[in-house]
Image (tube, helix red, strand yellow):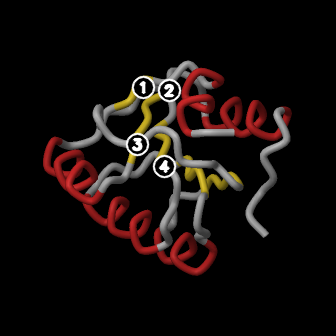
Amino acid sequence: MTVAELSNLIQARCLTPGLDAGREVTCGYACDLLSWVMSHGEEGMAWVTVQTHMNVVAVAVLAEMACVILPENIDMEAESLDKATSEGMVVLQSPLSAYDICGRMAAKGIPANS
């Protein structure tokens, strides 16, 4: 499933327009503890988090994730979005809860990280 397809699945809005939404999502993950995500992040991951600061972008880029997903229409600071855009990291905003987002990904066959 591509980031664009995932976006449709979770009713998301892209907060970083113009970036490549054709990247393949290989797994999903939900966590808000950045040090934990740093040790478990994977290339191609769709990461669901309520965190919105600059370090979220840094961790996602470091792990070469497919995208960051903010549940419950959480907004991300402009500075963080600017950094995400400059780094090519897609940030999605969904009205769904983190639980619902993960449930939809799992139902479509997106595995949890390995």
100 sits to left or right of 5: right
Where residue 35 appears, as percent x and y from the top left, is 49, 77
Quickly name the residue at label 2.
94
Q: Which callout, 3 or 4, points to the residue nearer the camera?
A: 3
Could you tell me if the residues under marks 2 and 3 are in contact, i.e. CB atoms within 8 Å? no
Amino acid type, residue under disc 3 in the picture = Asp
Quickly name the residue at label 1.
73
Could you tell me if the residues under marks 2 and 1 are in contact, i.e. CB atoms within 8 Å? yes
User: Between disc 3 and disc 4, whose residue precedes?
Assistant: 3
Q: 75 or 64: nearer the eye?
A: 64
User: Between disc 1 and disc 4, whose residue precedes?
Assistant: 4
Residue at image position (47%, 48%) is 68
Amino acid type, residue under disc 2 in the picture = Ser
Q: Residues within 10 Å of mark 2 (few under 14, many from 20)?
A: many
Amino acid type, residue under disc 1 in the picture = Asn
Disc 3 versus disc 4: distance between alpha carbons?
10 Å
Q: Residues within 10 Å of mark 3 (few under 14, many from 20)?
A: some
User: Between disc 2 and disc 3, whose residue precedes?
Assistant: 3
Could you tell me if the residues under marks 3 and 1 are in contact, i.e. CB atoms within 8 Å? no
Residue at image position (40%, 42%) is 20
Amino acid type, residue under disc 4 in the picture = Cys
Quickly name the residue at label 3.
20
Q: 98 or 58: nearer the eye?
A: 58
Quickly name the residue at label 4.
67
56 sits to left or right of 71: left
Element under label 4?
strand
Q: Residues within 10 Å of mark 1 (few under 14, many from 20)?
A: some
Disc 2 versus disc 3: distance between alpha carbons?
18 Å
Where residue 38 appears, as percent x and y from the top left, is 51, 76
